[in-house]
Image (spheres, rainbow, N blue to C red):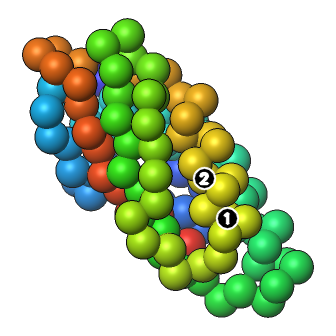
């Protein structure tokens, strides 16, 4: 799949940084979906950056995609920003839709690097 969607200028989505265990989902599709929502992901950070003078940071997430392609669980593994950004990112991820994993549930890990 050629990805015509570009990440937000200040938030690069690197398909090679997705760690996938369990059922198979094409990492290109996962990256494509994250790129579609990169403006929303960045907005989570941007609001807090403005309100709290943040200078960047990382958030590592882990989420599980169920047999129907819906995210059935999402959590933060580490957060070097703040709780509001964490809550916003999780809210977005819980509403994403992916193709059904082949073979089983799929657990995916990713680290956002906000600048």
Tell me the quarter of the image containing the N terminus: top left
Q: Which mark is residue 89?
A: 2
Percent x, y for residue 46? 76, 68
What mark, if any, has residue 73 been given in the picture?
none
- The residue carrying mark 1 is 85
The answer to whether residue 3 is seen in the rendering is: no
In screen coordinates, is 8 left or right of 75? Answer: right
Residue appearing at x 55%, y 63% in the figure: 11
Residue drawn at x 46%, y 44% is: 74
Q: Where's residue 21, x and y in %?
A: 15, 40
In the rendered image, the vertical position of residue 5 relative to residue 13, given as above or below? above
User: Going 67% across and 64% down the picture, which residue do you hit?
Assistant: 85
Taking 38 as reference, is 70 left or right?
left
Q: Residue at x 29, y 34 (%)?
A: 28
Q: Up-down: is 10 above or below 24?
A: below
Work out whether residue 57 can be spotted. Answer: yes
Q: Is residue 67 left or right of residue 48?
A: left
The kind of secondary structure element at disc 1 is helix
Label 1: few (<14), some (14–19) or many (≥20) C-alpha neighbours in 10 Å: many
Mark 2 and mark 1 residues within 8 Å of each other at the beta carbon:
yes
Q: Nearer the viewer, residue 112 or 89?
A: 89
Q: Quadrant of residue 50?
A: bottom right
């Amino acid at each position: 799949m050629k990805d015509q969607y570009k990440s937000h200028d200040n938030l690069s989505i690197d398909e090679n940084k997705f760690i996938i265990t369990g059922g198979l989902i094409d990492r290109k599709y996962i990256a494509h979906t994250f790129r579609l929502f990169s403006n929303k992901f960045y907005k989570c950070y941007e609001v807090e950056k403005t309100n709290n003078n943040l200078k960047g940071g990382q958030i590592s997430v882990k989420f599980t995609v169920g047999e129907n392609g819906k995210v059935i669980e999402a959590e933060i593994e580490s957060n070097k920003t703040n709780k509001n950004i964490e809550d916003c990112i999780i809210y977005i991820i819980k509403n994403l839709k992916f193709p059904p994993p082949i073979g089983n549930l799929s657990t995916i890990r990713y680290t956002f690097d906000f600048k």
